[in-house]
Each structure stands twice: as C-alpha cells, then as structure tokens.
Amino acid sequence: MAMFQKLEKGLKEIQYAKINRFFLISLFFISILQAQVDQRFDVFDWEIVGNNGSINSISEGYQYIFFATNGNGILRYNKFSKEFDQSLYLGQGIKSRKIKHVYFDKFTGILWSVGNEGLEFSNSREGNWNQINYDRLPLKSYNEIQDLGSSSNYLWIRGSSSYLKLDHVSGTFLGLFSYPDEEVFWGDFNYKNNLSVKNFAFEDFFVENGWLLSNQGAADQNGDFSKYVSFLETENGFGWIGLSNGYILALDNFSKTVYPISKGTEIAVPFTMSFNDKVWIAGIGNGKNSAIYSTDKKFEDERNFKDLSYSNFSYSDIYSSKALGDEIWFGSEGRVIIYNQRKDFFRTLGFDKGIPIERIDFIESLDDKVYIGSRNDLVVIDLNTKKIINSHISSLIKKNNLFIDDFKIIGNRVFLISNNKLYQFDSQEKINIEQGSNPFLNQYKPYAVFGIDNYKYFATEKGILNDRDEKIIPSSLYFNYRVSDMVIADNFLYIGTNGGMAVYDYQTNQLHNFFEFTFLKNIFDMEQINEFLVLLTSSGLVKLKTSL
C-alpha cells in the first residue's frame, strides 16, 4: 500500500486560482476529500472505544438514537435491537474529539455534528464525513452554538443572539437572522438553556439498579452524583437523559421505569492490557474515579469495575497488568492490585508486602513466580502465597543499582535491559553469558524487547533487530519515533510508536505501510485478539480488523 495522499500539490494550485463561483464549489468539495480518514478502509475497519466524558446531546434517526459525547464520538443505540452498535468517531472520519451537539435532519436524512474542530455532516450517517470550519461561518467557536434545527428547506443554528441559516444539503452559509423565517424543528433540550425540562417529574417512575433521581441530577448506587445535561423525548414514547458522567437514563413511559445504561470505558487514558478468557484494560483515571474495563474477545460484553464499588480498590492510576489464571494483577504507584475473577474480590499488596515504592511498570510471570518491578527495583513474589521469594535477578539489580529500561519474560527466558545493555536468564535465573554479552545486540544499545516464543525483536535508537540474524529494520522507516510495542501476526510486524503504527513485512523485508492517524498517536500497548489488532492509545482503545 502506498502512503496517504495529502493533496498538498493540488491545494497549492487552488490557492493561486481565480476566486469565482466555480472555485468556491471546488474548494468546498476539496475540504470534503480531506475529511476522509482513508479511502482504502471500510467505514468500521477502525473502531475507537473511549471514555464518554458526558452525554452532551441526543437525536433520533430512522434506526438509531444518537448521543454526542465529550470524548467517545457519537454513540448509536439501535431502536430495534435495543443494543449499542459501533460508535462514530475519529476512525470514521470525524475530526472533532469533543462533540457538543448531534442532530439528525429528517428532511434530508443527513446527520450533523457540532464539534471542537468544526460543523461536520454525513449523508450516509456513518462515514464520508464532511467538515465546515467555523471561520467560514460568523462563529468564533462551537461554544457559541446552542442548538441545531431544520425546516423544510434549511438547516438552522441557534446562537446566543441570532440564527444562522444554512443550506441543509451542503451546509453553505445563507444568512444571519433575528428569527427564523420558516418553522424550525429543533433538536434535544439542554438543561443549561431550557429551564422547563428541569421540572420533569420522576415520582411515577421506578428507578432500577439502586439509582436515585432529583430535579438537578442523578446519584448511582454508590452515591456518586451527576448532573443532567441533555434530554430527548422520542416518537415511540421513550425519553432519554444524558448525564455528566457519561451514563444515559432511559425512560420508558409505558412501564414507568428508568434504567441507566452506558457504553465505552470509564478510563481516561488506557495504558495496559492483558487477557485470559476476557480482555482486561486499565490505565489513568479521571482524577475522581478509577476504573478497570473488561470485555469478551468479541468485544461485545463489556463491564467497568469502579473503585467505589469494591473494598481494597481505592483510586489508582494503573501502568502495568498481567492475567494469571483467575487473578489479574495491576501495577499502580507503589502497590499491586489483584482482582480475583472467580470471587469478584480485590486485594492490594503494598510496601508492607515488599512492593517497590515507585510506579510499577513491569509485571511478568514464570512458573509460580511473579516479577514486579519499577524502574529502580524488582521483587519476586510467589503466585500462591503472595510472599517475597529470593531472586538472583532482584539481588543483581539492587546490588548494582541498575536502572531497568525493560523487563520481559518471553517463552521460558527472562530478558533484562539495563542502561541499554541486554541480559538474558533461564527459568532458574542463571545468566546466559553468550546472549548477555552479544556484541552485535549491545553495540546498538537496545532499550526494549518484544516477541513470543521463538520470535524476539529488540528496539534500539538505530532500528529494530531480531535474534535470528543480523538484519536491522532502520528506524528511519518509522520516522525515528520511539517504539513502544510490537505484534507479530499474518507475516507482518506491527510496530507501535509514539507517532503512529508501522506495518513491516518481515518476509520481504519491506515497509508495508505507516499509519499516522491522529487517533494512533502515543501507542502504549498492542495485542492481537482474534481478528482484531487492539491498540491502547491516548485516544482510547483502538480496534483494527486485520483481515483486510
């Protein structure tokens, strides 16, 4: 595959063209082309699962209820299956990370979005998103937009003191009005701007899952209070309320019940991933609540474990993890949090159990030994008794005051990289002198090792080496970004970096592609799970269908 085409040459030529009506139309359609994520992919080949932040707006379409979020794109709730389908976000071509309003125009069937990067719309209501920058409208930012609506002939934007009329197919600005000159069907109600909605009565409703409702907001079963943000009453007798914590309240006017539903993770930044029969993801919290996210390997059945719901699980940012049988071990700041899947119970090991007092960046296991390390310390704990056991590697690090660049167990071998020097140990922690002093590897100063069983790759400042020959993948092929993880699958080496993902064909020894989408910046962890390549990035959990 060729690298993306950015149309830079074409744009430069257009800048010098004569400004006339034809030029304006051409410029508009060129902006549409720029809005595509990549023409080689189907709409949902890339899927992002993030933290909702808050449910800012709600709109009803033919098949879906659409929910605009602060950090997870546009959620789609299927009215017929009563389940969430894939969300619409950066992977589908949307440019905005924060979406303030979503509006489905029933006159045209077009889905509109008001986000921090512009006014965006999709004719298919899935992909092919078109973007209109706010500098092409008499608006300074999306914060000036209070609501979207449509009449039979136009799209309308309600500002703080005026109304903007737009062509309801192309989005072309047609004028500024004190009042609309046609009957407008507006979108959902916002609790900040519509005082009448605050008088909605819940006295006749039964609230499920132990939630409590007031006129200002809702409290979950743990007493965590969230404000009402948006409200929509649909044509089929249902009502929907979006909350500031990312939850949605579904109001059934027939059964008189209110039940909370959610979609996505409650992790601000996912940082680490491990899996057994389920996929376990953890990372940086939102400063208020800490969460661990789990899902099945088809990514259909998801669950968030919040610290408020469990004892021995207080707020914790998590940097490493390892699934060990029924237990999943999570490394935090100076402690290890262990979740027993069968007992649905958390326990914490801290300094009193010998855990290093610094951030736990490494959790690895070999036989019944669990290796737990920070950058300056390493301890080994018995998996069953949870007690520290003697370790030659731990003693070596402490006696020599070694800094740990990387620590991995691959197959039955232990790999330690310290100060850009590689050490290899067998399962009995006996050092392999031949590998430990390998001049070819050490002259390149490795800083990380990746692989499975017989496939091992070493990341260095000059490129990537393997343990089978002396060939090197030059770092220039991935623009000298720092390598954070690698996955070997289908004869390809997927290389995650802080600037994007490189795909290298290690049979032909050629770069297959380099993806530098905005949602692939800062890749922290990667795994191949069934047909998905799963990446944890600063944008959230990213899934790529590898059967392309």
Image (cartoon, helix red, strand yellow):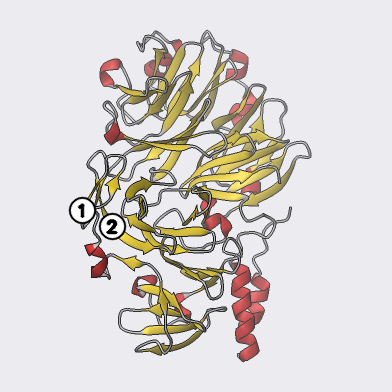
Res. 343 image quadrant: top left
Can residue 18 be seen by looking at this rendering? no
x then y, percent, for residue 300: 53, 39
Q: Residue at x 27, y 70 (%)?
A: 194
Residue marked by disc 1: 214
Nearest the eye: 529 or 447:
529
Please give left or right for residue 253 compared with residue 263 in the image: left
The residue type indicated by label 1 comes to Ser
The residue where tag 2 is placed is 228
| Residue 8 showing in the rendered view | yes
Q: Earlier in the sequence, mark 2 or mark 1?
A: 1
Q: Nearer the viewer, residue 62 or 394?
A: 62
Q: Secondary structure at mark 1?
A: loop
C-alpha gap between disc 2 and disc 1 = 10 Å
**Amino acid at circle 2:** Tyr
Q: Is residue 75 left or right of residue 20?
A: left
Check the image and report above or below for 212 versus 32: above
Residue at point 56%, 40% (across, down): 534
* Image coords of residue 36 (percent x, y): 61, 64
Residue 384 appears left or right of 425: left
Q: Residues within 10 Å of mark 1 (few under 14, many from 20)?
A: some
Is residue 547 placed above or below 169 in the rendered structure?
above
Q: Residue at x 37, y 78 (%)?
A: 158
For marks 2 and 1, give the one nearer the viewer.
Answer: 1
